[in-house]
Image (cartoon, grey):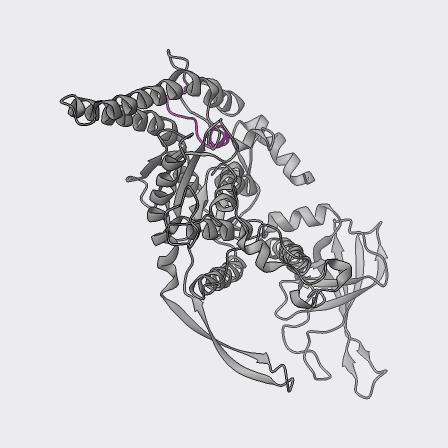
Amino acid sequence: MSLLTTLARLQAVRSGHAEPLATVRHRHLGERPLVLVPLATAVEDGAPLAVLLGTDRTAPALHFVPQPLNRERRFEFLAALADELLPYLESFGTEVELVSGSELDPQTGEKLPITRELCADAPQLIVPNSGGVRHLALLGRATRFRRTAEDPDPGPYPAPPRVPLLGRWLTHLTERAQVPGSSLLLPMTGLLARHWATGQSHLEDQQLGAQLAWHAPPAGWTGPTGAAAAEFVETARDEHGQLHHPPAGPATDPRFDEKRLAPAIARYDAALTALRHAEGTAAAAAAQQALQRSVAALRERLLGVLLPTWHDVWQGLDLLRTLPPAPHVAERWESDRWSYTGHRDRVAAGEPPQPRLDDAVTAARKLALREREQVRLEVGEALDDPLAMAERRLAGEAFSGLVTEVVAAQDTSGKTAKPRPLLTVHTADRPHAEPGREVHRAGAPKSQKAEITAVDAAAGLLTLRLLNGMGRGKEPEPGSVPAVGDRVTFTLFELTPRQSAPLPEPDDTPWTHGGPPAAAQNSTATSEEWA
């Protein structure tokens, strides 16, 4: 936690309200996001219980498993979820734009012009918290290898045909969620925590209702704001011992499981058993009605648990839309669109599902991508947001100040003279800088580097020599050199992350790193978790 974030949390404790950590929104929000609130059973990790989802805040769709221990009911739930979710995910794959580029000819090494399709937009899923992301990852892992009735050897419990495809999409979305700055799958608690600080810990912020209580008091609360309102959301119960504001999922409240959920499932089991015994008799109609009543009662109880979190997620979206998008958000969203387009093409080409374990090269590429995107995200946020840049200044990684003197100078060591003006900057910051250190100017018309030539810490003066970004002539281009009185910001970190070294193809992996990966074996392996 940075010093600025710590100060913001302390200020939130004093004021009783969430304090801003950003002046702009650092994540993309689509025009038609799909909100998904999952619930898992307490029986086993990742076992689904219910999900509330939709793109219309007034018309959510509920799907649930009336008996979570029944495999057939589980796959009926997953088939219904696939029928609801896959049309949304696939609807963004039809409208595309053509992007021109080039690629190297493997034989001649020449650059050949190519034109590729890029989806004009991409889907976006919003879940309440990071637990929801993990739950979807478990669903994807447990379903993308499932055999269906269309397979030569379907097995004893074949899944509906669309279930493995749903697993592949969920796996792609959850893996992409691990890339810093990605917006295809976002937890609402993480979104709010990035832009506002509350007076509670990061773990307490995982309760979405308690986190939102720092922004606005919950319904029915007339006491003080801040910690008291958050505690009310977390602990207040009705006369039956049930929480007024249940957890944000995927876990359920143990008292709800004991007093409300378990009896409802028991009544469903009893009604289903009675219907089986009454088949072919006069009591069959009454038994069928009893089963329908038990399902309706279970639906009502699950809706009571899910709807508060559903409304909380939409409230969080309303809060985030009050912030203008940061300039670098569009660039990161384009990267998400490429990711979505690539997975769409792999599915259309009939490629096998993602393996359970990555080979050495694929794992290294994923790690390199996440490290590179983390650097890009931090740099982009610092350039877009004064509060993010203030954190870097407090850490000594940047400094900002006024130009007090500009001295024209040239480098005559080469064949032609090059402009190398000297700037004197007065700053109250204390950067970790010494003579000879290279710095980078933020907000310059072009990429511009400078070298620190002198440091007077007592007077707060730094002398810099500009090294590039001034054109090719002997005199600097107009506007490329700051004038006296201009406020400038320089960073000690590079503003353009470096590309990592190229990795070999997976088939060319050396034996010291596992040899050629058994991709076929990994991709065709079956997963029997909770199935």
Q: Position of residue 114 (x, y in %)?
A: 51, 80
For the question of whether residue 224 can be seen, the reply is no
State whether residue 490 is above or below residue 410: above
Q: Quadrant of the N terminus?
A: top right
Give the residue displayed 69% in from the left and 39% down from the top. 3
Q: Nearer the viewer, residue 57 or 89?
A: 89
Q: Is residue 487 left or right of residue 510?
A: left
**Residue 304 in which image quadrant:** top left
Q: Nearer the viewer, residue 502 or 499?
A: 502
Q: Position of residue 171 (x, y in %)?
A: 51, 50
Give the residue displayed 60% in from the left and 57% down from the top. 380
Per the picture, the main secondary structure of the magenta-coloured stretch is loop
- The answer to whether residue 209 is magenta is yes
**Residue 373 in which image quadrant:** bottom right
Q: Which residue is most to the left?
A: 282
Q: Is residue 272 left or right of residue 473?
A: left
For the question of whether residue 368 can be seen, the reply is yes
Q: Nearer the viewer, residue 329 or 129?
A: 129
Q: How many dots with numbers?
A: 0
Q: Position of residue 249 (x, y in %)?
A: 46, 32
- The answer to whether residue 384 is magenta is no
Q: Position of residue 69 (x, y in %)?
A: 42, 29
Magenta range is 207-222
Q: Is residue 421 left or right of residue 380?
A: right
State whether residue 375 is above or below residue 264: below
Q: Nearer the viewer, residue 92 or 407?
A: 92
